[in-house]
Amino acid sequence: MKVILKNQKLENAACDALIINLFEGVKTPSGVTGAIDEALDGLVKKIIKEEDFKGKLGSTLVIRTNGEIPAKKVIVVGLGEEEKFNLAAVRKASAAAIRQAKREKAKTVCTILHGASIGKIDPYDAAQAATEVSQLALYEFDKYKSRDKNEPRKEIQTLIITEIDKSKIKDIEAGIKRGNLIARAQKLARDLVTEPALSATPTKLANVAKQVAKENRLKIKVLDREACKKLKMGAFLAVAQGSDEPPKFIEIKYTPKRKPKKHVAIVGKGITFDSGGLSLKPAGSMETMKDDMSGAAAVISAMSTMKELQPDVAITMIVAATENMPSGKAYRPGDVVRAMNGKTIEILNTDAEGRVTLADAVSYVVRQKPDEIIDLATLTGACVVALGDTSNGVMTNDQKLADKIIKAGNEAGERMWQLPLYDEDREKIKSDIADMINTGSKGKSGAQNGGVFIEKFVNDIPWVHIDIAGPSWIDKENEYGPKGPTGVGVRTLINYLTNY
Ligand code: BES
Ligand code: MN
Ligand code: ZN
């Protein structure tokens, strides 16, 4: 879908569906909504009353126009309570409205920019948010669906944002551009995660990373099993040894043209399929485990925007990609493996594999002495139990950095919620015969067990661990897309890397 800006009155725009809005409880529309109502001789006001439309955030009402204005239908979207109105409400209203327009089979849609005038939201932010979610709301993964080639696709082709205030045009145009770019990146992440593990192998991830690097003129290194062995990545390779798919250790580097303000390392968990290994998962828990490379998808997708965004920080992206499979060659509970930094890990459960691969991913990048390390990982079921699919679990050794990441995430519409790491939690990963175990206290503080484990490898560099296991996958469609992979993390990363 194309998103374009037109410097014209909304009521004059020719389209199949025209989107206006209403705050909760408003009975007499004002502003642009009022202008449309007037152009339709009070029809909007009348139908709102007849249908008892309350303006609840994200609710919609469809009105047929009968030719008084060029648009065939008007969609009223609720903005919720005026006092609570914010950027998150812009997202929800924009996404709900475009989905309604899709249900109405509209090809061309025009819309008011929610919040840019009545809601006092910065026009740039409003345009970016509206564009992002409108693109994401229409996302579909249909490459494996048979369909009649003769039947044309019924898709929304153009979204026209209208604005009469000339002084806002430039900002809105810039916001649309950024929104499109970020949505494209997040859709790439969704594509990568939705792709079955049969084809989304470590090799495939490496090839996509190569493509991203080429398109963005970034340096890339892909290490195979032999190269990882030379670097003594005993932890990563232990997880990989049970699989017939060759593992790939992927590093991408972005360097700004001018002297970088800092060097940020972003690390994504890249288990392309998590069977649990010999500590095999029950069948039901395995159904979604192609998503165990959501962290990898997020960091690779974030790198896909570098050519356009050109942030002023140096970035090193790391993905240690492998499957976690049971076999005669698989690592076992009880095994002791040695990570690249020399630390030893007693494996008690082969299903706690993500942290074991991250041990080497983090050890590798620590050698480069980055100023900050951010890892994104679908690390624990415990985090899903704690926070559900509505927020990501944040753990850290540096509160200042965590505060910034939490803010960047929440601003971008990806909720972050911090979990504590206490010394008592650190005690729980002690091993009788090695430097640490890969599990922790049974049935308790599962998310933090993962956090304190990774912390062992960051060598006091400011670090934030984001457990995205919950929000990376939704079981039911929502305003922002279909059920399944969400592409979470992309927006937080891009917002953080470009604005903080
Ligand atoms: N990939 C899983 C975590 C996960 C669970 C992600 C559900 C998304 C949804 C991870 O590798 C795992 O299996 N973790 C174990 C750790 C345990 C064995 C200590 C878990 O959470 O049960
Ligand atoms: Mn696992
Ligand atoms: Zn896993």
Image (tube, rainbow, N blue to C red):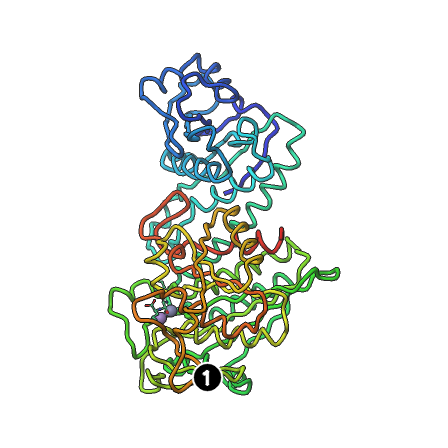
Give the quadrant of ligand 1.
Answer: bottom left
Q: Which residue is label 1 attached to?
A: 344
Going by the picture, which residue comes out furthest to the left? 283
Going by the picture, which residue comes out furthest to the top? 41
Q: Viewed as shown, does residue 367 lie left or right of 358?
A: right
Residue 437 at x, y percent in the picture: 39, 78
Above or below, 338 against 489 in this view is: below
Residue ID at (29%, 67%): 443
Residue 337 at x, y percent in the picture: 43, 85
Going by the picture, which residue comes out furthest to the right? 258
Q: Viewed as shown, does residue 161 lie left or right of 26?
A: right
In this view, the residue in front, 279 or 289, is: 279
Residue ID at (24%, 69%): 282
Residue 67 at x, y percent in the picture: 43, 18
Q: Residues within 10 Å of mark 1 (few under 14, many from 20)?
A: some
Above or below, 288 against 458 in this view is: above
Question: Can residue 58 be seen in the rendering of this structure?
Answer: yes
Above or below, 94 against 311 in this view is: above
Q: Viewed as shown, does residue 258 lie left or right of 21?
A: right
Residue 213 at x, y percent in the picture: 60, 65
Question: Can residue 274 be seen in the rendering of this structure?
Answer: no
Is the C-beta of the residue carrying label 1 under 8 Å from the nearest atom of ligand 1? no
What amino acid is labelled 1 in the image?
A: Thr
